[in-house]
Image (cartoon, rainbow, N blue to C red):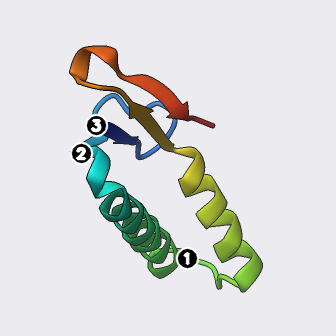
Amino acid sequence: MYQVIYSADYLDSNPLVKYFEDEEFNELEDFLTQEVEKRVQWTVDHSPYQVDEEDRQSFEEIEWTLIQILKGENMNTLTTIKKD
């Protein structure tokens, strides 16, 4: 089982939390890729400044640091496997 915790920022007290079974790892990757792209696009669309490719890549890097992935046999044994 995997638990994905995706915060809006470093101080987010109510992050997005999703669970995936071991055999759903591809779905987990797809979910994260789509969610990161959605959040980056929102930032680009709502920026008062023109955003170039370097800025966009920077936004994407920041988004990936807001994701934490835990793995375990069940809810009580989850341990962190990805955290920035």
Vertical side of 49 occupied by 19: above or below: above
Q: Residues within 10 Å of mark 2 (few under 14, many from 20)?
A: some
Vertical side of 25 occupied by 81: above or below: above
Q: Amino acid at mark 2?
A: Glu
Q: Earlier in the sequence, mark 3 or mark 2?
A: 3
Quarter of image, res 60: bottom right
Q: Which residue is mark 1?
A: 48
**Local SS, label 3:** loop
**Local SS, label 1:** loop
Q: Which residue is mark 3?
A: 1
Residue 6: x and y in percent read 39, 45
Q: Amino acid at mark 3?
A: Met
Which of the two discs, 1 and 3, sits closer to the camera? 3
Residue 51: x and y in percent read 65, 82
In this orientation, which residue lies closer to the viewer: 46 or 8? 8
Compared across the picture, whether 21 is left or right of 55 comes to left
Would you say the residues marked 1 and 2 are in contact, meaning their CB atoms lie under 8 Å apart?
A: no
**Local SS, label 2:** loop
**What label sits on residue 23 in the rendered view?**
none
Q: CA distance from mark 3 to mark 2?
A: 4 Å
Residue 55: x and y in percent read 71, 73
